[in-house]
Every structure is written in C-alpha cells, then in structure tokens.
Amino acid sequence: MREPLVRTQVVPYLVELARGGHRMHLLTFEPELKARWTQEEIAAARDELAGKGVDWHCLAYHKRPSVPATLFDIAAGARFVRRFVDEHDIDILHARVHVPAAMAALARRRTRRRPKILFDIRGFFPEEYTDAGRWKQDGVVYRAVKRVERWLMREADGFVVLTEKAREILFPESRTTGRDAAGRPVEVIPCCVDLKERFDFDQDEARREMRRELGVEKRKVIVYAGSFGGWYMTDEMLGLFTAARAADPNVFALVLTQRDADKIRVQLAERGFGTGDMLVKGVPADELPRYLAAADVSISFIKNCYSKQSSSPTKLAEYLACGLPIIANRGVGDVDALIADNAVGVLIDEFTDAEYTRALADAAALDDAANRCRDTAKREFDLETVGGTRYRRVYDRMNVNGIR
C-alpha cells in the first residue's frame, strides 16, 4: 500500500471506478506486515480508502526463497479470495498481472458465484524477468511460468494491455473488433495520471519557486525520474547528462529516484558534476510534479527488448503533464508513435555523444513544446477520460456480454 506505484497506478484507478458506481475491494500483500504496520495505521488507511469508495484488505507478503514464497502467497491469496467472493457476491476479479491472476483462477474453481476474471496483463511478465537477467531464457522457471500464463489466458474473461504493440502481439483481431478470437473484450489502457489530483496547480509559479529553491534560475535543467539498472539504461542516461555538460557547462542534472541515489551521485561526480550541479534524491509521489516543473527536458532510456513492447512508462505521462519534452530511445511500447505523432520530444537511434547532442538541440528547438506536451497528456493519459473510461467500458462489456 505504501509503494509509490500502488499510490499512483492502483489506488487512483480504483477510486475512479468507485466514482462510476462500482463497489471496489483491494487486496494487497504487505512486506513485514506486523513489523511495518500497527493496527491503528491499518485502520486509518482503511478509513481513508473507504471514504473514497474502496475497501482495503491485506495479507503478509513473503519474498524468500523466491519461488516457494510466491507459491505460498498465491495459495493464501486464493483462499482469501474464495471466501470473500461467496460472502460479498463479487462479480469481477480484477487481477493486476500474473500472480494475482493465478490467485483469481484458483479461487474461482471453488466458488459458488463464479465471478468473471479480468486479466490486467500490464506487461510480458516471464520475458521481463529473462530480459532483466533474473531468469534463464528457456530455463525451468521460465518454462513453468509460461505454462501457467497460457492457462491464465484460457481462464480469463477479459483483458487489459498497456500498449497497442502488446495488443498486436497477443490479440491482433481485437484492433478492429475490440474482442479476441474467443469473443472476450480487450482494452488498451496506458499508464495514466490523475491530472486533477496531482497536476492541477499553477505550474509556471511552481517552476519559478522550485528553480529558485534549487538555485537554478538561469540554468538548463535535465530531469530523469525513476529506477536504474535492469532494463533502465543507467550508463546511457549518464552519457546524455555528460554530453549535455560538454555542450553547456552550466547544465544541472536533476535525478529523482528512490534507489541507488548515492551510487548515481558518485557516477555523476566522476563525469564532472559538482555538488552544485546536481540533485539526486527520492521524493514522494505528491511532490514529484513540482520537482518536474523545474526542468526543461526529460529523459527515458529503456532497454529495447521483446518484453518492453508491452511497456507504458508512467514517467512519460508525468513528464508530459508537466510540459516537459522527452528524449527517448526507440522500440519501447508505443513511445515511438507518441513522440513522433505529437511532436512532444525527440527519438534517438543510437547511444553516442553526437546523438545525445543532436537530441538535446532538437528538443530545445521544439515550438510551443510545453503546451503541446500538456495537451498530449490530457488526450492520451488522463485518468478520468482515458483510464477510467476504458476500465468502465471493459467492466461493462464483461458483465453484459462476457463469457463465463
């Protein structure tokens, strides 16, 4: 519940669906539940969400050893869901990614009500682990998870994917029909942001205040928000910062990350950035927009691999909502089309100093970029008009025309 991703990419969607008349229940798995949460904190969090139309329930999360711990949590989740469905007349089990989908499918086999399952796929989970180097390609674990994935695809009554590329790979027929070959509804819903709740503020004033606070009123600020390592290309992003500094020694590096902050500071320092030339820190989700407002351009370099065709980086919606043009590499989800069709940034073809310098110059030359970025965020990533509308649509289609 306290994870930034849950606060920005789970709870807002549920609140939006509750506003549309759905009674929502949320089950999370909490690391070190008894150590990190008091009963008073749990009660306060439940009251907060209940006031927004969402009932919260939690179980303990187990991490190690990885596979046995995950199997244990799946069994615990399935038991909880089975009882809960029959007690509360649940119509839809909305499973966000594969592990909850396994809980839902197992639970439904022993329920009287037989709710429908919405498989919110989000990403190509097995391939993400192999692309990140955590599993061996075609190893025992990978092959076992792929078998489970095929079973879940058969069990589901509807699907959500994040990108049009993912739709083309999994459900190409749904582009014209809105349904897969078995007649089950398919919806493409990118990672959206709550523009009213998080980004509805005077951004010009926030920009002036934050730039004054950071001491960068007359400097060019380049921002990266998010994690490093895995498929997030640390060396390449640092390379862009370095090329920017070579072209303009007055450049300021703003890195907003929850992890590896000390490591990134050291690496920037090795590239010539003094303590007054950078800020590397983690900020809460509700403060992130004001830090972004201080920047001039943003970065998103993600490994171009098979699994990332299904990826919709939340940071892109956040960047655009703050009027920031994006420098990104090709081949990640629908990013190529987003940037090219809306002229909200620059795509690079290779990771070289010359290409970084070219991209920075092209981004600076974009005409009326801030307004176009915000308009694109509203049109493509607004939680209410895009995310909420499409989730309500797939819920309705599953209830009215879905297949049991």
Image (tube, helix red, strand yellow):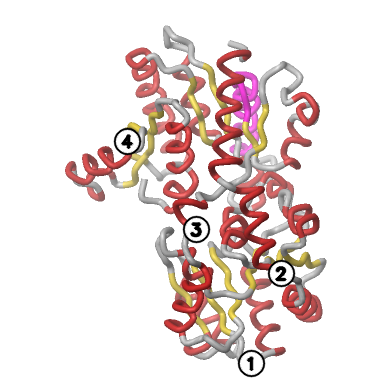
Q: Is mark 2 on a helix, strand or loop?
A: loop
Q: Residues within 10 Å of mark 4 (few under 14, many from 20)?
A: some
Q: Mark 2 points at which residue?
A: 368
- Amino acid, disc 1: Pro
* Residue 303 magenta: no
276 relative to 254, above or below: below
For the residues labelled 3 and 2, the Cα–Cα distance comes to: 19 Å
Q: Earlier in the sequence, mark 4 or mark 3?
A: 4
Q: How crowded is mark 2: few (under 14 residues within 10 Å), some or many (20 or more)?
A: few
What residue span does the magenta drawing correspond to? 140-159
Q: Name the residue under label 1.
A: 249
Q: Name the residue under label 4.
A: 58
CB under 8 Å between discs 2 and 1: no
151 horizontally vs 258: left or right? right
Q: Which of 329 and 290 is in front in this view?
A: 290
- Amino acid, disc 3: Phe
Q: Which of marks 2 and 4 is in front?
A: 2
Q: Which of marks 3 and 1 is in front?
A: 3
Q: Quadrant of residue 272?
A: bottom right
Which residue is at 35% across, 16% downward? 88
Q: Mark 3 points at which residue?
A: 199
Provide the major secondary structure of the magenta segment.
Answer: helix
